[in-house]
Image: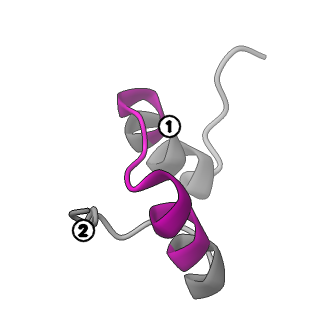
Amino acid sequence: MIQYSMTLPFHPLINTWFTETYNKPTAVQEEAWPLIVKGIRGRD
């Protein structure tokens, strides 16, 4: 299996678990995670 190379915004242990379990995030996750890390909220 080809491993996904995007740096995920989580602790390294979580990054390893995620990529070994799911390989890569969905398009929605890729768009949302940077906003979540920045503290930007959606619908309030």
Question: Is residue 25 located in the magenta-colored stretch of the structure?
Answer: yes
Q: Secondary structure at mark 2?
A: loop
Q: Relative to 13, is 34 on the left or the right?
A: left
> Residue sitting at 70 percent across and 14 percent down?
43
- Residue range of the region highlighted in magenta in the rendering: 16-29
Which of labels 1 and 2 is toward the front?
A: 2
Is residue 42 shown in magenta? no
Residue that numbered label 1 is attached to? 32
Q: Amino acid at mark 2?
A: Ser
Amino acid at circle 1: Ala
Q: Is residue 13 left or right of residue 35?
A: right
Mark 1 falls on what kind of element?
Answer: helix
Q: Is residue 17 above or below residue 36?
A: below
Identify the residue at image location x=39%, y=36%.
31
The answer to which image quadrant residue 38 occupies is bottom right
Name the dominant secondary structure of the magenta segment.
helix
Residue beneath disc 2: 5
Percent x, y of residue 7: 35, 70
For the view shown, which residue lies furthest in the right direction?
Answer: 44
